[in-house]
Amino acid sequence: MCRNIKPLFNFDPPTTEEEIRAAALQFVRKISGFQKPSQSNEKAFHQAVDDITAVSARLLDALETVALPKNRETEALKAKARATARFG
C-alpha cells in the first residue's frame, strides 16, 4: 500500500492539498492496518489523517532546493517505463 505514496516535493505544478491528503490517508491506512476504520476508531483515524496532512504540508512548504522542479508528466512516463521493464 505505501508503495503508492509518491514523492511530493519539487514538482511543477506544485503539489496540491488533495495529493498531500491522499498520501496521508495511505500512510494512516498502512500503519493502522485499516482500510476503513470501525465506528469506534473512526474519529481517531480521521484525526490522524488530518494531523499528518497538516504536518506534511508544513514540511513541503519548509523544504528548499536549488534543483529545477520536476515535470509530473515526465516523471509519470519514467515510472511507466520502469514498470514495463520490471513487469513486462
Image (spheres, rainbow, N blue to C red):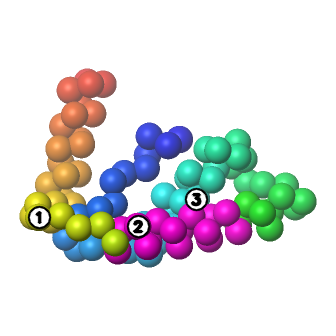
Contact? badges 3 and 1 (CB < 8 Å): no
Helix, strand or loop at label 2? It is helix
Helix, strand or loop at label 3? It is helix
**Nearest to viewer (mark 3 / mark 1):** 1
User: In the image shown, does 54 or 78 lie closer to the viewer?
Assistant: 54
As shown in the figure, which amino acid type bears the numbered disc 3? Leu
Label of residue 59 in the image: 2
- Within the image, what quadrant is residue 17 found in? bottom left
Can residue 15 be seen? no
The alpha-carbon separation of the residues under discs 3 and 1 comes to 30 Å
Q: Residue furthest right?
A: 40
The alpha-carbon separation of the residues under discs 3 and 2 comes to 17 Å
Q: Which residue is drawn at the image coordinates 73% and 60% (left, top)?
A: 45
- Within the image, what quadrant is residue 9 found in? bottom left
Q: Which residue is drawn at the image coordinates 23% and 51% (left, top)?
A: 76
Q: Which residue is drawn at the image coordinates 51% and 68% (left, top)?
A: 55
Q: Which residue is drawn at the image coordinates 18% and 37% (left, top)?
A: 81
Contact? badges 1 and 2 (CB < 8 Å): no
Q: Which residues are magenta?
A: 47-61
Helix, strand or loop at label 1? It is loop
- Within the image, what quadrant is residue 70 found in? bottom left
Can residue 41 be seen? yes
- Residue tagged 1: 66
- Residue tagged 3: 25
As shown in the figure, which amino acid type bears the numbered disc 1? Val
- Residue 12 vs residue 23: left or right? left
